[in-house]
Amino acid sequence: MPWTSNNKVMTALAVTALIVVIGFSPACEEPGEVMTDTRTVALEGAVRALVGIDMGAGELKLRAADQEPLLEAYFEFNRERNRPELEYDLLGDKGILKIRHARGRGINFGTTRNRWDLTLSRAVPLELDIDLGAGRNDLDLRGLKLERLEIDMGAGEMVLNIQGSHERSFNVRIDGGVGSARIYLPEEAGVRVKVDGGIGSVDLGGLTKAGGAYVNDAYGKSEVTIDVDIDGGIGSIELVRETAGKVKI
């Protein structure tokens, strides 16, 4: 039978499909036994730090503690590709820590176990950049010397606690995805919350409206002010003060 152009096309398509399958197979990973990893990152002389957390889908628990290392971390995962990567560098007196999933995650099949339990030091001022995926995220930042906090929520649920005393003013920016957020706010520091974008519902937790935003009783009176900007597509937000009841709108 003569070798036609159609035969050549079909052969090329078959070869291409085979290459795709061969290349795709290593990227597909079935779940295995749960693996664990523990990591410690020392300050190495840093007197302040920038911490970036890129979680992806899973369960994140973030805490503060009186400890010498900048980070104490415990990870659980059932795929090797979900083993986190940590990078730490010094830029002058500033430590820069990045915690993220390995590059080239590929496609996972079956049940995924992915849990990060992170503890940050209260010893130095911190800037936090947190990028979240689907899942439950519990961020208890009480006691941290926060200078800036930025959160990209993604999907799922987030609980953020910044209650307690604060020595300095700082800004909080939350870019929403879908899901819900509960934010615990301090009482002694002045708090101003501005909400923009497609928010489904807001529970103000006793804050009052002032100039296009919502403030607590200490706003304008306290030496410390926390400005919270919430932007975009969160299903619901609940603001919780250390005292007082809730007022719904």
Image: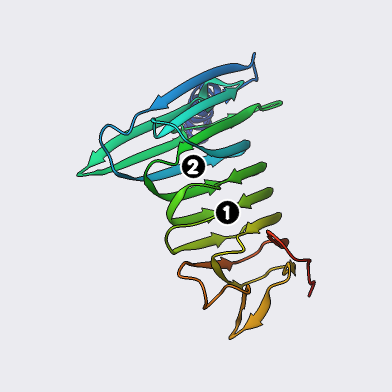
From the viewer's perspective, tell me whether residue 19 is left or right of residue 89.
right
Quick one: SS at disc 1? loop
Residue 155 visible, this angle: no
Which quadrant of the figure has residue 78?
top right
Q: Position of residue 227 (x, y in %)?
A: 51, 68
Q: Residue furthest left?
A: 92
Disc 2 packing (10 Å; few <14; some 14–19; many ≥20): some
Q: Position of residue 244 (x, y in %)?
A: 75, 66
Q: Toward the viewer: 38 or 242? A: 242
Q: Position of residue 126 (x, y in %)?
A: 40, 48
Disc 1 packing (10 Å; few <14; some 14–19; many ≥20): some
Q: CA distance from mark 1 to mark 2?
A: 26 Å
| Earlier residue among tags 1 and 2 | 2
Quick one: SS at disc 2? strand
Q: Toward the viewer: 1 or 148? A: 148
Instruction: Tell how many labels.
Output: 2
Q: Which residue is mark 1?
A: 164
Residue 127 visible, this angle: yes
- Which residue is pictured at 39% across the width and 31% down the height? 68
Marker disc for residue 54: 2
Q: Position of residue 130 (x, y in %)?
A: 50, 48
In the rendered image, the quadrant that contains the C terminus is: bottom right
| Type of the residue with mark 1 | Gly
Q: Toward the viewer: 45 or 57? A: 45
